[in-house]
Image (tube, grey):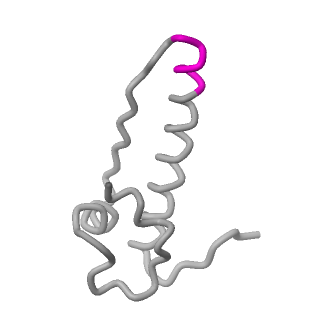
Amino acid sequence: TQKHVTLSSGEAELMALTKGATEAIGVSQIFEEWGRARTVEVQTDASAAVGIVHRKGNGRLRHVRINDLWIQE
């Protein structure tokens, strides 16, 4: 079963990018606790997600959850 239903492919790409970044930050914190600090860089080829991330706020998107916009920081 699906956890989320999205209304656009851009929203699905943003949710995947957010999930990946969240997990990467978690792994980075584990390495930091072990004394092996690592930097994290998340990359994507999803142009819609990149466009959403580079703008401020949700712009004209009306169906994106605010929880997924923290990645804009």
Q: Residue at x 51, y 29 (%)?
A: 28
x then y, percent, for residue 47:
27, 62
- For the magenta stretch, what is the residue range? 30-35
Numbered marks: total: 0
x then y, percent, for residue 59:
27, 81
Closest to the observer: 1 or 21?
Answer: 21
Q: Residue at x 52, y 47 (%)?
A: 22
x then y, percent, for residue 69:
40, 66
Residue 14 appears left or right of 53: right
Say whether residue 31 is magenta: yes
Residue 3 appears left or right of 38: right
Is 20 drawn above or below residue 55 in the view shown? Answer: above
- Outermost residue on the right side: it is 1
Say whether residue 9 is magenta: no
Prevailing secondary structure class for the magenta stretch in the rendered image: helix
Residue 61 appears left or right of 33: left
Closest to the observer: 24 or 70?
Answer: 70
x then y, percent, for residue 57:
30, 74
Q: Residue at x 41, y 60 (%)?
A: 70
Residue 52 appears left or right of 29: left
